[in-house]
Image (cartoon, grey):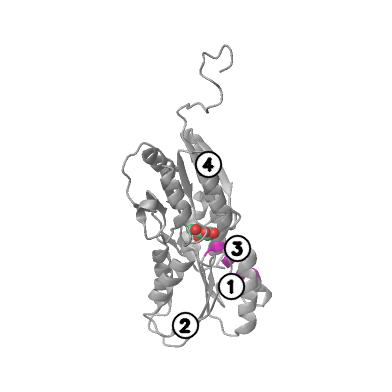
Amino acid sequence: AACGDGGKGTDTPKDDGKITLGFSQVGAESGWRTANTKSIQESAAAAGYELKFSDAQGKQENQIKALRSFIAQKVDVIAFSPVVESGWDTVLKEAKDAGIPVILTDRAVDSADKTLYKTFIGSDFVKEGVVSGEWLVKQYEGKTDPVNIVELQGTTGSAPANDRKKGFADAIAKAPNLKIIASQSGDFTRAGGKQVMEAFLKAHKDIDVLFAHNDDMGLGALEAIEAAGKKPGTDITIITIDAVKDGMQALADGKFNFIAECSPLLGPQLMDLVKKVKNGEAVEPRIVTNETTFTQEQAKAALPDRKY
Ligand code: GYE
């Protein structure tokens, strides 16, 4: 110990009682993600936590590296939004062995061992797909003509892509004339949505409906549809998920027809959970976000107060 420091030494990090949270984010692929990152950063600051924030740029290998670095740094709690569902058991076991509690935010993992994480906070993605499909079935109620649907899937292997696809397919199965004629990943980005929609429009002359797993891909698709000389929202019915500002604007403008909301504002609830698991308190294993749906009229009414 250096002279004059009371013999305490300076090489061990001092515990100032501040909670250190390591958070590994998916990336910055969409408006949803930007709002989610902001919510997490702002609420960590408001809670007085030290936030170690890491952006995985859409790659699972980067997330695994970030989690290992959080373990090495002995953070109090790790939270992350897993890019894809599978392949987490080994690193989650490492965190568990190090005695660091893990919270899943936004997206699920498919690990069979549920003791590898304390809780999972986020939306019910299957339900978002179901309400989207049910709305569409209702639009064609009493009609038997074939309805051709194209689908823009989210990131391959991600929980929201898997679950939204399933929920939507289950809901439209009730109307045999509603058929998905093409389905491909646009990776949750505007550029991806535009590119895949261009290919869909070239391959299929008779597209009635677009179901996009998020607003951003729908917004990208708008450009492709307009460039093909068609009117989005009229010639092609468009359903998306998220309800970020740009998506809500497109809905209010009549270019989208329906949005199932998915809330990115997980920060405040996450910070409460972080404190609880740090203190060894019991938490619910699954916390589902509250959300709604929007028609064009509802979007017009909601837009002025929309925060993101
Ligand atoms: O819907 C999409 C984002 O995991 C819920 O990821 C999230 C999804 C969201 O890129 O826009």
Q: What residue type is labelled 4?
A: Ala
Categorize mark 1 by other alpha carbons within 10 Å: few (<14), some (14-19), many (20+).
many
Q: Which amino acid does label 2 sit on?
A: Lys
In front: 235, or 104?
104
**Which dot marks residue 232?**
1
Question: Is most of the magenta stretch helix, strand or loop?
Answer: helix
User: Of helix, strand and loop, which one carries label 1?
Assistant: loop
**Which dot marks residue 189?**
3
In the rendered structure, which segment of residues is drawn in magenta?
A: 214-223
Q: Are the residues flagged by discs 2 and 1 in contact, CB closer than 8 Å? A: no
* Mark 3 within 8 Å of ligand 1, using the beta carbon: yes
Cα distance between the residues tagged 4 and 3: 33 Å
Mark 2 lies on residue: 179
First in sequence: mark 1 vs mark 3? 3
Q: Which of the two discs, 4 and 3, sits closer to the camera?
A: 4
Q: Is residue 134 left or right of residue 7?
A: left
User: Of helix, strand and loop, which one carries label 2?
Assistant: strand
Cα distance between the residues tagged 2 and 4: 50 Å
Q: How far across and how far down the image is residue 295, in percent?
A: 46, 65
**Which dot marks residue 72?**
4
Q: Can residue 102 be seen in this view?
A: no
Q: Are the residues flagged by discs 2 and 4 in contact, CB closer than 8 Å? A: no
First in sequence: mark 2 vs mark 1? 2
Categorize mark 4 by other alpha carbons within 10 Å: few (<14), some (14-19), many (20+).
few
